Image: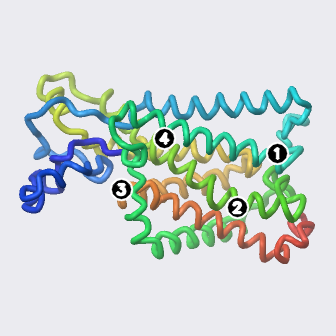
Amino acid sequence: MSLYSANDSDDGKVSSDDAQNPHDASREEPSALAHLDSPERMEEETPLRRIPHLGHALVFVGFTGLLLILLEAVLAALGHAPGAVRSGVATVLHPKLQLALLATTYVTTLLAAWGFYPQVWQRGFLDGIEWRWATARNQAGKLIALGLLLGIMMQVVTYFIAPPKTLPVDDFFRTQMDAWLITLFGTVLAPAFEEICFRGFLLPAFAIAYDWLSLPRTEQARARWQTTTALTPAGVIFSAVLTSAIFALMHAQQVAHLWAALLVLFSISLVLTTVRVKTKSVAASMLVHGAYNGFVFLSVLFATGGYRHLERMTQ
């Protein structure tokens, strides 16, 4: 998700190393989310492109939604609908089939994005969303510890919440095999896809849209828009709040629309956004997300004796 040119650096000047190696300096563009708006970042050059912008994000989300609906329709036509709505409540009829449906949708979307966006952005997909695995790997210990801490805090908060005996997510814990499959899905694929969607696409897209709509209609402002892709603090904050609200609402059904649980999920999303902005790496927020989910599953794993006594979840 590099949003400004390779010539921008932390102090607004090219470093001595870059000056000695001009070809190396052009290989990687720094992060717009890491460098907020400052008066010094003005350059005489052609207009820069901001990616991913709102159009890019809408294509990604729209493709995901349409593919999911299409696959569900095909399964329903074949008489194998993975879920149904009963008394206004969505129920998972076939957990394995539902997980296979989601996994197919996520993987297909990512493969399509891998091939499509580099043609539009003129750069690699992972570079465009600022995946930066090396950054996440170097700080893996701290990131995983933060995720586990979030999981502990979630458990403490839920202790004071009086949820119903059964939650929609419990449908994925009917058998030991179902439980292991949702654990694998929830700690690996789901965090990766959700972080790419929310922190890789939607976070910069909403921030860019905010900055454009709030841009003063003056020649100086337009010149600045064309010579830097740095985001304003207001744009980042607006996007963080909006994406976190969407993130929480997306998981509302899993927690039976409990407002206290939704507030916790909103707060967790803000933490994930902060990690993404501070580290300039979507992979970093993915590690935190995966560790958080992993702690939740780990607590259920211990409570049910390695998923051998799933009936304890409703006791």
Residue 173 is situated, as x and y percent measured from the top left of the image, at: 84, 59
- Image quadrant holding the C terminus, namely bottom right
Q: Is residue 60 above or below residue 297?
A: above
Q: Amino acid at mark 2?
A: Leu
Local secondary structure at mark 3: loop
Distance CA(mark 4)–CA(mark 1) = 25 Å
Tell me which label, 1 or 3, sits earlier in the chain: 1
Relative to 182, say whether 7 is above or below. Answer: above
Q: Which of the image's four quarters has the N terminus? A: top left
Percent of width and height locating residue 198: 51, 45
Identity of the amino acid at label 3? Answer: Lys
Residue, x 64% and y 63% (percent of image)?
293
Classify 10 Å Cα crowding around label 2: few (below 14), some (14-19), many (20 and above).
few
Determine the residue positioned at 62% across, 40% down.
108
Amino acid on which the number 4 mark rests in the picture: Trp
Q: Nearer the viewer, mark 4 or mark 1?
A: 4
- Amino acid type for the residue under numbered disc 1: Leu
Residue at (21% x, 27% y) in the render? 216
Which residue in the structure is indicated by mark 1? 97
Q: Which mark is residue 114?
A: 4
The residue identified by callout 3 is 280
Give the Cα separation between the discs numbered 2 and 3: 26 Å
Q: Which mark is residue 181?
A: none
**Disc assigned to residue 184:** 2
Q: Are marks 4 and 2 in contact (CB under 8 Å)?
A: no
Q: Secondary structure at mark 2?
A: helix
Q: CA gap, disc 3 to disc 4?
A: 20 Å
Is 226 on the left-hand or right-hand side of 126?
Answer: left
